[in-house]
Image: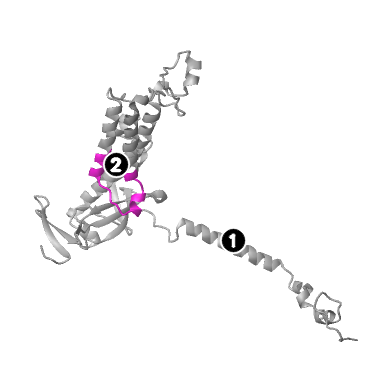
Amino acid sequence: HSHREREITYSIYSPSNPIQFNPIENNKVLMVVISIKQADGDGFLVETTTDTLNQDLIRNIVDVHNGRLRAQVVVDSVRGLAEYGVQKEQSLIGNDELQEKLTGVAVEKGPHYKPDPTGMRCGNPPGPAEENLVQTLRQTALDLEEYVSKNMVQKRIALSASCLKDKLANVRGAVIMAYPMGLPEYDLVRISLDSDDLKSTFVGNEILDPEQTSLWCAGKEFQRDNHQKVSDRLGKNEKTKVICKLTREGSGAPGREPIVKEEERKAMMAHYFKRQEDLKKLAEADDDDYLNSQWADTREMKRNLQGLGSGIKAPGLRFP
């Protein structure tokens, strides 16, 4: 390598493209940063290169998108598992007390029974002897939650599908340690960790198909045809950072971002409303209303000098 700050390194990429050029600046490989923006200010960062095929980029971004949705289900269900135990069968879901009254069958209650407010779980979590395993469950879930948080955009940390899989594997290992006998197949923890189909979960409508998803930037779509690359859309500058959006294929371009942020819009509306109220008061005021004010009285000075007013008295002066 040269002793200059910027160097070029070479690495094997693939049989179809054997050489990949990775510019390095200040000992850091330069990458194109794709900022995926979603509803309610949510989003994440993904890194790629200008030589990446568009179809590979879209597949990678969709994998991260779906992985974040899976992580939401995993985190929510694992916390419920640690707090209230395994999930009930579909026919038994409901408030335990009501179930006992309606069916006349006593609900199984362990020594550490804690009823689930949602009625989904049995209420028999691991006991104090397994507290370390429960803490491991909660910690791995917290690590996963922090990794997929939208705060990672502010921290400028890009997500990857491989790292997401590692985080999910950590949670899976913690679940196996806490429940070595395994979880029932209908438990949401097991479904979210092992099943490829999340349609039955609360994120089912947001899951995207990599082959039927479009990527948009500045109102233009990343084309998959003719093996087009990222450079065909963004140029060859590896230091590029762009904001993109995902849509389902055939739904057209996503709506444009508002010029003014929501907080700024609310502040502007409050200011204009106050201004409008002030103008309304001025319009309703009498044009000659000021003449009744003390400062507008032309004889006020004379009265003060004569000692008739509340002002300073001037002895020796008399007015007819």
Residue 290 at x, y = what percent? 75, 73
| Looking at the image, residue 72 lies above or below residue 243 | above
Determine contact: label 1, label 2, CB under 8 Å.
no
Note whether residue 303 is visible: yes
Q: Quadrant of residue 11?
A: bottom left
In this rendering, the answer to whether 318 lies above or below 155 is below
Tell me the quarter of the picture where residue 4 sits. bottom left
Residue under the image location 40 percent in, 49 percent down:
39
Give the image location of residue 196, x and y in percent: 27, 34
CA–CA distance between discs 1 and 2?
44 Å
The answer to whether residue 86 is seen in the rendering is no
> Which amino acid does the dot numbered 1 rest on?
Phe
Is 53 rendered above or below residue 320?
above
Determine the residue positioned at 77% across, 77% down: 296
Rendered residue at 11%/65% (across/down): 2
Left or right of 15 in this view: 107: right
Q: For the magenta stretch, what is the residue range?
A: 146-167
Pointer 2: what residue?
67
**Residue 273: mark in rendering:** 1
**Residue nearest the viewer, comparing 155 with 136:** 136
Element type at mark 1: helix
Residue 103 position, x and y percent, is: 47, 14
Which residue sits furthest right? 320
Q: If you read the primary sequence from the N terminus, does the residue marked by circle 1 or circle 2 appear first?
A: 2
Secondary element under disc 2, as helix, strand or loop, is helix
Residue drawn at x 41%, y 21% as measured from the top left: 91
Q: Is residue 229 left or right of residue 307?
A: left
- The one nearer the camera, 289 or 152, is 152
Q: Amino acid at mark 2?
A: Gly
Circle 2 crowding by C-alpha within 10 Å: few under 14, some 14–19, many from 20 = some
266 drawn magenta: no
Q: Where, quadrant-wise, is the N terminus in this rendering?
A: bottom left
